[in-house]
Amino acid sequence: MSETAEFDERQWRRELAANREEKDEFFGTHPHSPIPKGERDAFDGLEYFEPDADYRVTATVHLTDEDDEDVYRMETSTGGEQRYLKVAALTFELDGEEHSLSAYRQEGEERESLFVPFRDKTTGQQTYGAGRYMELEAEGDLADGQEIPVDFNLAYNPFCAYAEQYACPLPPEENWLDATVEAGERDWD
């Protein structure tokens, strides 16, 4: 997740379009799609904000000391809870303001990806009312002070946005951004 190569916006737009096309195909046809089976024939794709490179920011990683990693019991959309470890804070600038989001890993999970649930000023209006998620893939071990790209254009709705039977973690209050993020997936109905 390092910013070693210069950003190629044309390539980024192609990759984003391919990502969205692949996701729409999965949602419309795959047996594990969260779209209820009876609604898949009428499904013609998810709603997205227009791609905007301004919502692809560089964040500085502030690692949580392993001895201080707290277990966060995130409430879920079904009233239960899931346990996560806060592994880092990601600080970045958006629209001229500094913001921070916490990054988590599910307790006991060995994957290196970072789970970043968040809410912003579009939540419940233009985007899903419980918030959205981002998954950031780590390339090797993260280092304190490392800079990584965070692309809000990849923000997605949890499966519970499409069907009630899914138990989706709700973004903790520390990940409620006081910013408007018109990027990624929009609300779906």
Image: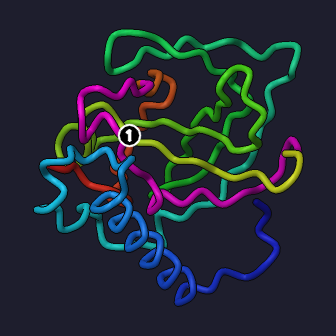
Can you say whether 110 is above or below 186 in the image? above
Q: What residue lies at 33% left-to-right and 21% top-to-bottom?
A: 77
Amino acid residing under circle 1: Pro
Q: Is residue 156 left or right of residue 113?
A: left
Say whether residue 25 is magenta.
no
Number of marks:
1
Residue corresponding to mark 1: 158
Which secondary structure lies at badge 1?
loop
Mark 1 Cα within 10 Å, few/some/many (few <14, many 20+)?
many
Can you say whether 142 is above or below 1 in the image? above
* Span colored in magenta: 143-169
Q: What residue lies at 71% left-to-right and 13% top-to-bottom?
A: 70
Percent coordinates x, y for residue 158 in the rendering: 38, 40
Q: What residue lies at 76% left-to-right and 68% top-to-bottom?
A: 3
Percent coordinates x, y for residue 2 in the rendering: 79, 63
In the foreground, 25 or 134: 25
Percent coordinates x, y for residue 18 in the rendering: 46, 78
Q: Is residue 132 left or right of residue 162?
A: right
Q: Is residue 61 left or right of residue 121?
A: right
- The quadrant the N terminus occupies is bottom right
Can you say whether 53 is above or below 70 in the image? below
Q: What residue lies at 44% left-to-right and 21% top-to-bottom?
A: 173
